[in-house]
Image (cartoon, rainbow, N blue to C red):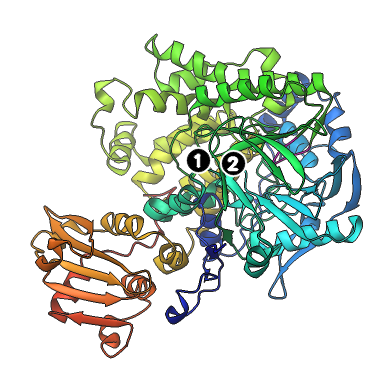
Amino acid sequence: MNKRHIYPKPIRASQSNSPERYLPAKNLSAVISILLLSACSGPLSESSSEASEYTKAQHAKVLEALPFEDKQDFNDSNKGLIARAHANVIKDGQSVWNTQAFNFITGDAPDTVNPSLWRQATLNHQPGLYEVTDGVYQVRGFDLANMTLIEGDKGWIVVDPLTTVESARLALSLANEHLGEKPVSAIIFTHAHIDHFGGALGIVTPEQVAEHNIPIIAPEGFMGEATSENVIVGLAMGRRAGYMYGSALEKSDKGYIGSGLGKGPVMGTFSILEPSITVSETGQRLVVDGVEMVFQYTPETESPTEFTFYLPKVKAFCGAELLSRNMHNLYTLRGAKVRDALKWSNHINEAKELFSEAEVYFGSHHWPLWGNQAIQTFLSKQRDLYKYIHDQTVRMINNGLTSREIAEQIRLPKSLANYWPNRGYYGSLKHNAKAVYQFYMGWYDGNPANLDPLPPAQSAEKYVKAMGGAESVLKQGREAYSNGDYRWAAELLNHLVFAEPDHIKAKTLLAETYTQLGYQAESGPWRNVYLTATHELNNGAPEEGIDIKVMEQVLKNTGAEKFFTSMAVRVIPEKAEDQTTKLKIHFTDINERYLLWFENSVLHHKFLEDTDAAASESDISMKITHDLFVDILIDNKDIMDLVTTDDLNVEGSLIDLVQFLLVFEKPKGDFEVVVP
C-alpha cells in the first residue's frame, strides 16, 4: 500500500513522484504558531512585581471556596507509576524540553499564582510511564499531550504520538526500556491537532509502515483539518498564540507554569502520516492488532474532526479530547472558529450512554480515572458544564444581554463549579460564554453606538481629552490600581497608552496592572496573556516579526486549492485593480494545471482539465514545480535568477509575470498588540 508521508526534510523535486515521498509537516496554529514566535524572540524576563495585598486576598477567597481537602486527583495522577520520565527531550544536541524546568512547582501555591491553577500545574507535573489497566499504558509529561500505548498481538498500538519526532521517540523508548521492546503495530490519531500526530515519524519510519502494512487510523477528514488552519490566518494566529501559550515566558512562579491542559508543547521536529483507515460513524468497530475497538465519531467538538473509542475487553474508554480535566475552550484566545457547545455536550452524553460499562477512563491529556461511578459522574458533569454554558448564555441573549454583560453575570451552580475537572484552567467561563454569544449573534451587540465605533487609537485620544488629559487619566488609573480595581485600571490605562504610546509612566503602570491580573488568573492562557503583555509593555514587541518564510513548509505541503486561497488573502487591491494578465500554471511535480486571473481586485483560480478550453485564454504559461513556485512567492528565490533553471519554463512575457507576482504582499506578523 502506498502512503503519503510528510516529514520536515524536503526532497528534491526530481524525486517527488516516489510513493515514499518525505514532505515537511503542515501544522496547526495552536502549536506551530508558538514556534514561529519563539523563533524570533528570546526568553522573557521574570516580572519584578510581587503579589499585591488585593491579589493575596483574592487567592484567600479561592482557597476558602474550593475543596482543596479533596486529594483524590493526586492519588489518581500517581496511580500505576512505573518509571519517571527522562529530564530532557533533545533535538540536534540541544534540549527542546526539560521536565526539570518545572521542579519549582511543589508545595503550597506562591502568592504570585492562583492556588487553583497551582494545584492543576502540580498535577500536570508528574512526568513518567504509567500503567492504566491491563495492556494499556501512558507516557505523560513529555509534551502537552499524552502518548497512550495499547499492547496488541504483535506490538504497540500507539495512540496520539505527541507533538514532535523527538518527544515521541523518547516516550516510546521509555516504554520499551521498562516494558520490553515491541514494534509499532498501529497508530491512532484521535483528532487533527498537532500534539496528537506531530511525532508520528519518531516512532515508525515510512519504510516500516509500507513494509509491515501498519494501519494508520484517524477520523474522517483528518488530513484536511490537520493541514488547513495555518494557511489563511496563520501569521495573525501565530502572533496571538505567543500570548496565549506564553511561549517565551520563563518557567517560574512569576512566569510560565503551564497551560492548564498540560505542561506545554515541545518545539522540535514535526511530522505526519496519511491515514490508511478512517472512522466516519459512531459504532464503527475495528480489530486492531488483535484488539477490539468500538469508535464514537465526534466531529465539530473540540476538533472539527475527532473520535473517541472503547476497549470492550478491559472496559476502558479513551475520551480523546472530548473530555479533559478542565473546562476546555469553546473559543481559543489565539483565534479560531467558535466551537459548538451544544454538539459537544450531546456527544459527551452519547459517550456516557454508549460506554456505560466503562471501568477505566483515559484521555489525550491529564491523568486517568477508575471506577464506573466516578466515570459516569465525570461524563455527566462535563456534559452539563457545556450545556449549562450554552443554555444560560442563550437565555440571557433572549433577555437582551450583550456578551460582556453575560460574561459578568453567568455563574456555574455549585455542583458544577466545585467539581475540579470543570475548573477553567484552559477555557474560562467568561470567554466561553462570549463564544456562545458569538456563535449565535456575531460581533454586533445591538447597540447602535457599537455599530461603527472609532478605531482604538482615535477613540483613546478623545477619551483622554474628555477625561482632562493624560495626567488626569494616569492619576485615576493609579487610584484604581491602588484600590485593587485592576480591570478598571487596565481599561483606563489602555486608553492612555493608545493615545500616547510613548507615555512611560502609563505603560509601566499598565504593565504592573496586567501582572496582578496574571497572578490572579485561574486560566493558564489568561495568565500567559497578561504576563506576556507585561513584558511587551516594558520591553517592546519582538524585534523581528514572523517572516512569511517560516511558513514555507506549511505552504509547500498545502493542496493547491488551499494554497491559492492563501494567495488571495494577500492581494494588494491597488496593485490588482488594473491587472488583466491571465496566468496558466502547470505544476510539473504534481501534474496539476490551474488558471489564475484577477477581476475587481479579486484573485480567482480554476482547475484545468487536460482538454479545458480555458487553458487557451492565458497570457502567460508557466511550467514549474509547486515547491519552487512557493519559493518565489515568499522570496526564497528571485524569479530573475531562475530564467535558466530546468524547474521553470515560461511562455509569454517575463515582465508581465513579475508584475503579476508583485500583487501579493508578504506580511511579517510583527504587529503590535498592547500598543497601537
Vertical order, 306 against 27 (above or below): above
**Residue 311: x percent and y percent?**
75, 35
Marks 2 and 1, the one that precedes in the sequence: 1
Q: What residue type is labelled 2?
A: Pro
Residue sitting at x 45%, y 39%: 493
Q: Who's the residue at 82% across and 25% down the image?
A: 68
Label 1 crowding class (10 Å Cα cut-off): few <14, some 14-19, many 20+?
A: many
Mark 2 to mark 1: distance in Å? Answer: 8 Å
- Displayed quadrant of residue 122: top right
Front residue of 125 and 24: 24
Determine which residue is flagged by label 2.
Answer: 525
Q: Please say whether residue 538 is visible from this viewpoint.
A: no
- The outermost residue toward the bottom is 644
Split into 4 quadrants, where in the image is the N terminus? bottom right
Callout 2–callout 1 Cβ contact below 8 Å: yes
Residue 466 on the magenta span: no
On screen, residue 222 above or below 552: above
Q: What stretch is highlighted in magenta?
A: 362-367
Residue 261 location, x and y as percent? 67, 40
Q: Mark 1 points at which residue?
A: 333
Instruction: Provide the secondary structure element on which disc 1 rests.
Output: loop
Main secondary structure of the magenta stretch: loop
Foreground: 16 or 55? 16
